[in-house]
């Protein structure tokens, strides 16, 4: 009987011993590569700080310069967590018709691992590279992707 | 309530609470995933095509001076005698591209026109309408008219002078 009580008590305590607070990740700004003319193809990269650049004969329109994705992560004070970004070529943007564009080289700030401060809340920013084909048809392209955070 | 009088039951109850607590604990989120949108906008490439040439028309050189062709096609002269029968014309271009987007217009500096022999004149001070920045219509086009100033020498040889110039456009 005592052993059973002890087991039950341990069971009650167990959930509290590991991570005291759930991990929550909220996206509040999407990733945008902005507006550009495709020319004969190339790439457009948006960094986690929101800086946009291109390679190849892509013409970037300054009026719509793109933006990084932004998240807020909340969890336990001072705990470390890891960030898992989408794999290359796993995300595509589509206009609904015609050829799609592939997103590669997702990057985040902080990169791969973060650690909460005393408040248990932190901002995560994500950028990536968009691959554009020669004569990519004009249009508005969209898609979605997911990132995952885990306690270390 | 009656069952609590049985001896074994308090332990069972504790165990039940323990089981519930464990299941609540394992439901606690040690990981979370968030989905986000990714977007991009590919615009129609911009292009420009010439639909009318710049012409300063006919004039007598007089003591030399200049002929100004405004983008709206109005010609004026200074030091020269303009012949009204051949009033000249502003150049006209059609710009095509992404609807409702602004673009920059780049005009030449100084261009030389020649009579095919030894005579030449400079064309400079190019102006355009719209000037510097244009905005494509909702249909994705706009007309750009271009004028300039022709410098006429005091001993300018009579003849037909021709040359060419470039106007370029790029998205802002």
Image (cartoon, rainbow, N blue to C red):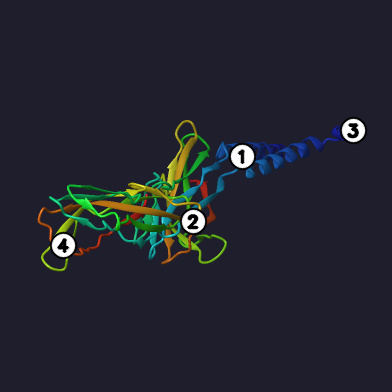
Give me the residue at 41% from left, 46% from top: A63
> Quick check: marks 3 and 4 in contact, CB under 8 Å?
no
Residue B110 in sight from this viewpoint: no
- Chain containing the residue with disc 2: A
> Quick check: marks 1 and 3 in contact, CB under 8 Å?
no
Q: Residue furthest right?
A: B2
Disc 1 residue crowd, few under 14, some 14–19, many 20+, Cα 10 Å = some
Labels 2 and 1: the sequence-earlier one: 1
In the rendered image, which residue does mark 3 sit on? B2
The disc at residue B158 is 4
> Do badges 4 and 2 share one subunit?
no
Is residue B12 found left or right of A12 in the rendered image? Answer: right
Residue A77, given in percent of the width and then of the height, sits at 49, 34
In the rendered image, which residue does mark 2 sit on? A86
Give me the residue at 53% from left, 66% from top: A98
Is residue A60 found left or right of B161 in the rendered image? Answer: right
Is residue B121 found left or right of B92 in the rendered image? Answer: left
Q: Secondary structure at mark 4?
A: loop
Which image quadrant for residue B91?
bottom left
Q: Residue furthest bottom?
A: B116
Q: Secondary structure at mark 3?
A: helix
The disc at residue B122 is none
């Amino acid at each position: 009987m005592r052993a059973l009580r002890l087991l039950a008590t341990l069971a009650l305590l167990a959930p509290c011993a590991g991570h005291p607070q759930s991990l929550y990740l909220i996206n509040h700004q999407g990733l945008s590569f902005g507006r550009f003319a495709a020319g004969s193809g190339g790439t457009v990269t948006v960094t986690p700080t929101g800086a946009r650049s291109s390679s190849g004969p892509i013409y970037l329109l300054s009026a719509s310069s793109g933006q990084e994705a932004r998240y807020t992560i909340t969890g336990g004070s001072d705990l470390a967590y890891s960030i898992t970004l989408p794999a290359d070529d796993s995300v595509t943007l589509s206009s609904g018709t015609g050829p799609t564009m592939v997103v590669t080289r997702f990057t985040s700030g902080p990169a791969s691992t973060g650690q909460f401060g005393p408040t248990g809340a932190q901002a995560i920013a994500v950028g990536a590279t968009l691959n554009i084909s020669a004569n990519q048809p004009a249009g508005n392209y969209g898609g979605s992707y997911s990132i995952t955070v885990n306690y270390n | 309530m009656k069952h609590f009088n049985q001896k074994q039951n308090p332990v069972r109850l504790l165990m039940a609470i323990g089981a519930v607590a464990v299941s609540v604990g394992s439901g606690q989120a040690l990981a979370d995933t968030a989905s986000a949108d990714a977007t991009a906008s590919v615009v129609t490439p911009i292009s420009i095509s010439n639909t009318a040439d710049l012409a300063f028309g006919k004039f007598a050189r007089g003591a030399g001076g200049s002929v100004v062709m405004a983008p709206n096609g109005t010609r004026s002269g200074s030091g020269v005698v303009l012949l009204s029968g051949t009033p000249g014309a502003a150049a006209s271009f059609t710009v095509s591209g992404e609807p409702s987007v602004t673009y920059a217009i780049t005009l030449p500096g100084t261009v030389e026109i020649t009579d095919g022999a030894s005579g030449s004149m400079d064309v400079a001070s190019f102006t355009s309408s719209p000037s510097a920045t244009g905005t494509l219509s909702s249909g994705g086009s706009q007309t750009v008219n271009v004028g300039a100033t022709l410098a006429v020498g005091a001993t300018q040889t009579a003849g037909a002078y021709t040359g060419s110039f470039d106007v370029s456009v790029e998205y802002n």
